[in-house]
Image: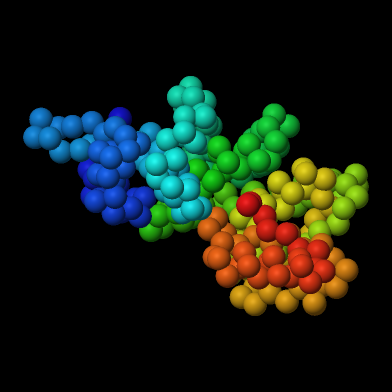
Amino acid sequence: MALYTIGEVALLCDVNPITLRAWQRRYGLVKPQRTEGGHRLFTEADIDRIREIKRWVDTGVQVSKVQSLLNNETDSERDGWRAQQEVVLQILQSGNLHRLRLWFKERGHDYPAETLTTHLLLPLRRRLQGQQPALLLMLSLLDGVLISYICSCLSSARKKNSREALIIGWNVQDTTRLWLEGWMASQQGWRVEVLAHSVSQLRPEMFDGQTLLVWCGEAPTAAQQKQLLDWRENGHDIFSLGN
């Protein structure tokens, strides 16, 4: 079992070591092991938990409230999703994209899009978003298969769903998240199209008569939230995704 120092974890998770110590001492959110000299050592499971904590904090949740959110998922459930992540990683390392497509198709029958996105795909993609070329290559392979699979799901959903909407990213960098949001929206009864690239300036008047589902990232700014509300009050059929 690999163990990581607090400095290594700080780099992997983009979290200041001082913050990690506070999450442990003040809030009890992480429980690293200790060497005989008292130095902290973190496992892969600890790193997953830290990334999940950071995700909640980045979305605006107070650190003191995160523990209750984490407790909603049992250790056995987390271990189960972690095992599925490892399966995907092994397939990616083998380069067998056909096998990966089949694997996602099977999981898509077993779980709804929101469950897969929250518990499998987002944590897995965070693990691959490092600086190492091998990780970036696997992330690119994963995203390509994901978008292809989601396209087929959206095509099937268009045959039965009745409410049409356009998925738009507003000042976001992660295009794959747009497709994941579109996939989840399609299972909520929407017949969606996905705007391929994020926009820096959103102009709802250009999409007159269309419903817009806007993804502003995991932590939309106060200005974005106010602008969306103003547009709705002015008669635009526009809603924020993920909030």
Residue 77 percent coordinates (x, y): 52, 25
Query: Can you say whether 223 is above or below 152 in the image?
Result: below
**Which residue is more in the foreground, 61 or 4?**
61
Pick out the residue farthest to the front.
233
Can residue 100 be seen by looking at this rendering?
no
Can residue 213 be seen by looking at this rendering?
yes
Q: Residue at x 91, y 50 (%)?
A: 162
* 206 left or right of 142 in image: right
Residue 96 percent coordinates (x, y): 58, 42
Q: Residue at x 28, y 40 (%)?
A: 26
**Which residue is more in the foreground, 217 or 101?**
217
Pick out the residue farthest to the left.
37
Coloration of the structure image: rainbow
Residue 62 percent coordinates (x, y): 43, 47
Q: Residue at x 85, y 66 (%)?
A: 210
* 79 left or right of 40 in image: right
Q: Residue at x 18, y 32 (%)?
A: 34
The quadrant in which the N terminus is found is top left
Query: Can you say whether 33 is above or below 184 in the image?
Result: above
Pick out the residue farthest to the top.
76
* 59 left or right of 107 in image: left
> Number of marks in the image?
0
**Which residue is more in the foreground, 228 or 124?**
228
Residue 220 percent coordinates (x, y): 56, 62
